Image (cartoon, rainbow, N blue to C red):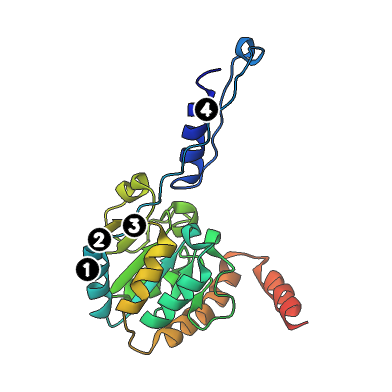
Amino acid sequence: PADLGAMLDRAYAAMLGARPQPVHIEIPTDVMKLPLGPLPPPAALPRPPAASAAELATAADLLNRAQRPLILAGGGMRFAEEALRDLAEALDAPVILTTNARGLLDGHPLAVPVSPTLETARDLIRGADAILALGTELGPTDYDMYFNGRLPDLSGIIRVDVCPLQLARHPCRLPVRAEAGAFATALAPLVAGRGDGAARAARTVAAALPELAAVEVEMPGAQAMVGAIRAG
């Protein structure tokens, strides 16, 4: 029982201090009945890691030299929609939204709510000369759902994630361990776009609809239903 306070601190640090994840504490049944004294005050949660000035400057330089920048946004941005929008607009970059980021930037001309498994989205990735991945696992359920192995090479991307294990799983040009929303906020004033992001996004979304209809037999009906709901 005397260890419970410290164990709770460890559990909350693991659950909330970095990449959110479930945590459980297992207590043996013979310990459950033992008396418990007052618990100490909870420890402060560790601060999420932040990008260095050098990392921000390097990322800004790579993106500012690009003619066709692109953002891949994952679940790490789901509570940072404003930061994502400000960065996308400053950079004038289309934003491919994975399943865990879907719903962000709804209706925005730079939003590409299209699975990167689709060839239309992969064409957008192939055509980009600088890619910023924000809080996305780059996992197969988003990027290679049909397991055809045709995902473009992502080893040259700038990748931002709060979890060092995620950063170690995929090679990239610039790995940055940081909270993705805070990174986007800090980066936005340092970049400037080229002016064709909305057009690239629109072409991708328009091409994705017939591709979806070809690979999913029920998709046209679902698309019609969603369109009716939005129109109504």
From what the image shows, is residue 230 above or below residue 146?
A: below
Horizontal side, residue 60 vs residue 33: left or right: left
Residue type (three-letter) at the residue carrying disc 1:
Thr
Instruction: Report the mark closest to the observer, 3 or 1.
Output: 3
Instruction: Give neighbour class at mark 1: few <14, some 14-19, many 20+ (Cα, 10 Å).
Output: some
Quarter of the image where one finds residue 160:
bottom left
Instruction: Report the mark closest to the observer, 1 or 2.
Output: 1
Numbered circle sitting on residue 174 = 2
Q: Earlier in the sequence, mark 3 or mark 2?
A: 3
Q: Is residue 141 visible?
A: yes
Numbered circle sitting on residue 58 = 1
Horizontal side, residue 171 vs residue 7: left or right: left
Numbered circle sitting on residue 129 = none
- Mark 2 lies on a secondary structure that is strand
- Mark 4 lies on a secondary structure that is helix
Q: Nearer the viewer, residue 221 or 99?
A: 99
- Are the residues tagged 1 and 2 within 8 Å (C-beta)? yes
Residue identifier under label 4: 5
Instruction: Give neighbour class at mark 3: few <14, some 14-19, many 20+ (Cα, 10 Å).
Output: some
Q: Earlier in the sequence, mark 4 or mark 2?
A: 4
Q: CA distance from mark 3 to mark 2?
A: 14 Å
Q: CA distance from mark 4 to mark 1?
A: 42 Å
From what the image shows, is residue 216 above or below residue 200?
A: above
Residue at (35, 44) in percent of width and height: 165
Q: CA distance from mark 1 to mark 2?
A: 8 Å
